[in-house]
Image (cartoon, grey):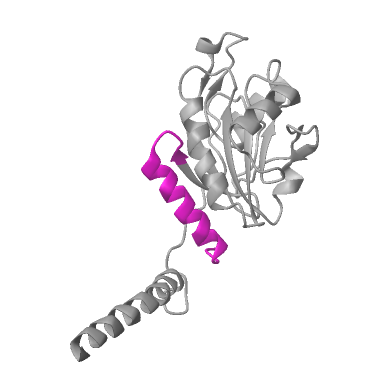
Amino acid sequence: MKGLRLLQGMVLVCILLIPVLVFLFLRGFGKNEYDLPIFFQKGVDNPFQECPVTDTTQHFIPEFSFPNQEGIPVGRAEMEGKITIVDFFFTSCPSICPVMSKEMERVNDMFRDEPKVQIMSISIDPEYDTPAILKEYADEHNAIPGKWHFLSGPKAETYALARCGFVIPTIDGNGVPDDFVHTDKFMLIDELGRIRGYYSGTNREDVDLLMLETKVLLHGSK
């Protein structure tokens, strides 16, 4: 009987130690050793001269504001002071978007109670993806209002934002779903508007890493 009680006590101690060990891992015994990269600290290469000429200092997400699925303007201003996870998609996408949206549902659910984390899914087919269409799509994917924004803005501005702001390849399909070209990447943006990571939105392990590194930012990575 004493041996059973001792074993139960040891198990309880181990269980209680788990959050302590996780905390020590993240904080590095007083200092967070898990620092995330900061992308484009010396500016963004612009070999085809398709983006505005910038200097060689830290790249930040530029100003933009598009209506979301509720018709409410959301953009760069709403990113200030928050961690934002961004992807580019379109609702009639026949290939990677359904997988990406299902993976983003997991992100949406993971941070449902964290007010400092939000999601922006930006349509690359804004002529079709009106706020009404986006609202239906958002409901299908259990998007939390005010947490997961589905955005649709002017086409030229959207493509410039993708290529020059988030630094991802994007090609207009001119209304033909199979002709659109866009990346599967989810992008992690910190509270200052800096890009901190790119992750495949079609790979579950990569999305798991995104969620882990989002938590690292929440715990104070610089």
Q: Is residue 188 something that shows in the picture?
A: no
Q: Residue at x 59, y 45 (%)?
A: 56
The stretch in magenta equals 199-222
Reply above or below: 52 against 209: above
Which quadrant is the C terminus positioned in?
bottom right
Q: Position of residue 11 (x, y in %)?
A: 29, 78
Disc tally is: 0
Residue 212 drawn in magenta = yes
Q: Position of residue 133 (x, y in %)?
A: 69, 22
Main secondary structure of the magenta stretch? helix
Q: Position of residue 14 (x, y in %)?
A: 32, 78
* Residue located farthest toward the bottom when viewing the structure as drawn: 2
Q: Residue at x 53, y 35 (%)?
A: 45
* Residue located farthest toward the front when viewing the structure as drawn: 1
Residue 16 lies in quadrant: bottom left
Q: Is residue 18 something that shows in the picture?
A: yes
Which quadrant is the N terminus positioned in?
bottom left
Residue 179 drawn in magenta = no
Position of residue 99 in the picture relative to residue 156 (left or right)? left
